[in-house]
Amino acid sequence: AYQGYYDDALGITWLADADYARTTGYTEDGRMTWLASLGWLASLNAASHLGVDNWRLPTVVDTDLPGCTGQSFAGTDCGWNVDVSTSEMAHLFHDTLGNSAAYDSDGGWTGCYLNLPNGCLANTGPFSNVAAYGYFSGTTYAPDANDVWMFNFHSGSQYNELKTGE
């Protein structure tokens, strides 16, 4: 099994186990607040996990100030089919893994959201324990510092969420 996956398009390495915090017993169920996830990453960096000491959460470029006022269907930072050049998780979901979002770029319902249990997460590639739920980015949501950008692997959408959520 792979421990890491180097994404040559982004020039970054992903942990191959998407639920590594649970797998290693850091958390019981893998769920963490945003702040707790930063602490977990600090522990990986302190241990130079896989010889790496700069693990981080994926980034998002916040392009639509004043923020997510409505869900779009393509080309922005909020909604479905977001610009993969501004979101590392969108790039992973769509380009690397080849998954579709719940809506196409014209706003048409794709139906993948209804596929149980993983919705639009049809392909996980070389990764293990990828869950069809939201993952935090490392980027604070500019209009509200209590929120962070999140990518949902069930619907293929990106949105803002409270940092205190799990």
Image (cartoon, grey):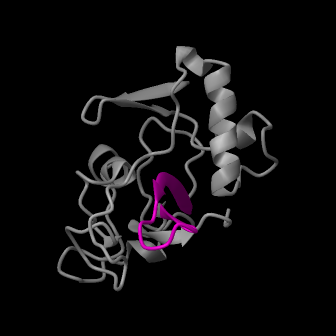
Identify the residue shown where x is 28% and y is 36%. Answer: 10
> Could you tell me residue 59's position as x and y percent?
40, 48
Identify the residue shown where x is 42% and y is 57%. Answer: 122
Identify the residue shown where x is 45% and y is 54%. Answer: 139
> Could you tell me residue 6's position as x and y percent?
38, 27
In the picture, residue 51 is in which quadrant? top right
- Work out whether residue 69 or residue 112 is closer to the camera in this orientation and state it: 69
Q: How many marks?
A: 0
Q: Extreme top residue here? A: 51
In the picture, measured across the screen, residue 148 lies left or right of residue 107, that is right
- Work out whether residue 5 or residue 52 is closer to the camera in this orientation and state it: 52
Identify the residue shown where x is 33% and y is 62%. Answer: 62
Residue 125 sits above or below residue 86 on the image:
above
Residues in magenta, as a range: 133-149
In the picture, measured across the screen, residue 117 lies left or right of residue 64, that is right
In the picture, measured across the screen, residue 157 lies left or right of residue 128, that is left
Q: Is residue 51 magenta?
A: no
**Which corner quadrant holds the N terminus?**
top right
- Work out whether residue 110 or residue 106 is closer to the camera in this orientation and state it: 106
Residue 66 sits above or below residue 34 on the image:
below
Q: From this viewpoint, is residue 116 visible?
A: no
Residue 59 sits above or below residue 105 on the image:
above
